[in-house]
Image (cartoon, grey):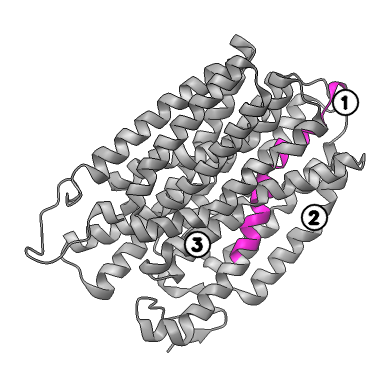
Amino acid sequence: MTARSGRWIQQWDPEDETFWNRTGERIARRNLLFSVLSEHIGFSIWTMWSVLVLFMGPEYGLTPADKFLLTSMVTLVGAVVRVPYTFAVAVFGGRNWTIISAGLLLVPTVAAFTVMEPGTSFTTFLLVGLLAGIGGGNFASSMTNINAFFPLRKKGWALGLNAGGGNIGVPVIQLVALAIIGASGGPRVLLGLYIPLIVVAATLAALYMDNLASVRNDTGAAKDAARDPHTWIMSFLYIGTFGSFIGYSFAFGMVLQNQFDRTPLEAAYVTFIGPLLGSLIRPVGGRLADRYGGARITLWNFVAMGAATAVLIAASTEKSLALFTVAFVGLFVLTGLGNGSTYKMIPGIFQAKAQALGLEGEAAAAYGRRLSGASMGLIGAVGALGGVGINLAFRQSFLSYGSGTGAFVAFLACYAVCFAVTWAVYLRRPAARPAGETPATEGKPQLSYAEV
């Protein structure tokens, strides 16, 4: 049974089906629910500048290049803070850090509320925008925390729900902005709506979430994960999936405005659709990975992403707004599928490594939970850097060619490399062991990387 001290759970073994069915699943689902809420608002605050720039007309004195640079820097901070946020779960506990990280979202929201008016300098907007990057960190700590609550057989679906519920914070703030713009409201109305929501999320986390003692003070897990080559291979693949999702979420509206001369309201009518569908489909990507193997789903997803990008290049060249919009939304959906499948691969990879080292049963599961949880923050941080690259690529493409076509060509090449890496590392030799390892359990069934 679970022994509890305050809000700490001292013993947790989700791989034990009896424990899981009696108490574990109920507790895990409750923590998942309130983790999603906090992460959801974190994503909204992180991406709020993708919406605020739509409000910033000529009276603000910002060029399209200024706006792309602003959103790039916000994305960069969101990527960087994911590393300490991952460590924070081990130091403070999942529940405790959720309370703190939710409360910290008040800082960028109140700051933006204060400076959002014409006449404010670009430097001030940039500095305040950087504060919003802390919202990107919530994802890393949330995924690390929830990963520890669920058994391996449930991780794809659970992590997909957690991440998808967080990702949907992007289209939600865009939808709210659409309503406000349509009602002739200003950006301060949007920011004012989120301040009480942040307080509610922090309060609910305090009331209903738990800390797991098994993940506390294990900061050495992050060092072990950082030394593992699979952490960095998966980071690269996550650049292709999540980096695309978050980068396109920031850039979609600005591309429509600058390449197809859409007004802020016209852009807002469609910019939320892609992130919304990409967020909703993420758990499906995790579920498909649970059933068919994350590596297989990820591989063919990159093929589809490449095809969608090729259509975007054609639509951009032909100046076809309808085809461009449909292809872009389709690409968003594929990024969501890929987000779910790549994250499911992570615990499976470390479970396979545990078996290759001769570990069995709970020892293997504990090894997998420990390293996969630690690596998720690092992978999430590096993956989010893809969003920085996408916005910088669009900025340069518009400066050089007056359109986003050049950027899409670069993205197509990136997806081709991601496909090659997935095949070479995880599917070309399905039974291969991690580099430098020797079989510790000859003759015993091993988890194939093709199944992760």
In percent of width and height, residue 169 lies at 66, 51
In percent of width and height, residue 399 lies at 63, 12
Q: What amino acid is labelled 3 in the image?
A: Val
Q: Residue at x 43, y 60 (%)?
A: 156
Q: In which quadrant will I find the C terminus?
A: bottom left
Give SS at disc 2: helix
The answer to which of marks 1 and 3 sits earlier in the sequence is: 3
What secondary structure do most residues of the magenta stretch adopt? helix
Query: How many numbered tags mark residues here?
Result: 3
Q: What residue does disc 3 label?
A: 89
Near mark 2 (Cα within 10 A), the count class, few <14, some 14-19 or many ≥20, is some
Q: Which mark is residue 119?
A: 1
Residues at marks 2 and 3, CA–CA distance in whole angstroms:
24 Å
The answer to which of marks 2 and 1 sits earlier in the sequence is: 1
Near mark 3 (Cα within 10 A), the count class, few <14, some 14-19 or many ≥20, is many
Seen as rendered, the residue at the extreme top is 400
Q: What amino acid is labelled 1 in the image?
A: Gly
Q: Residue at x 35, y 63 (%)?
A: 370
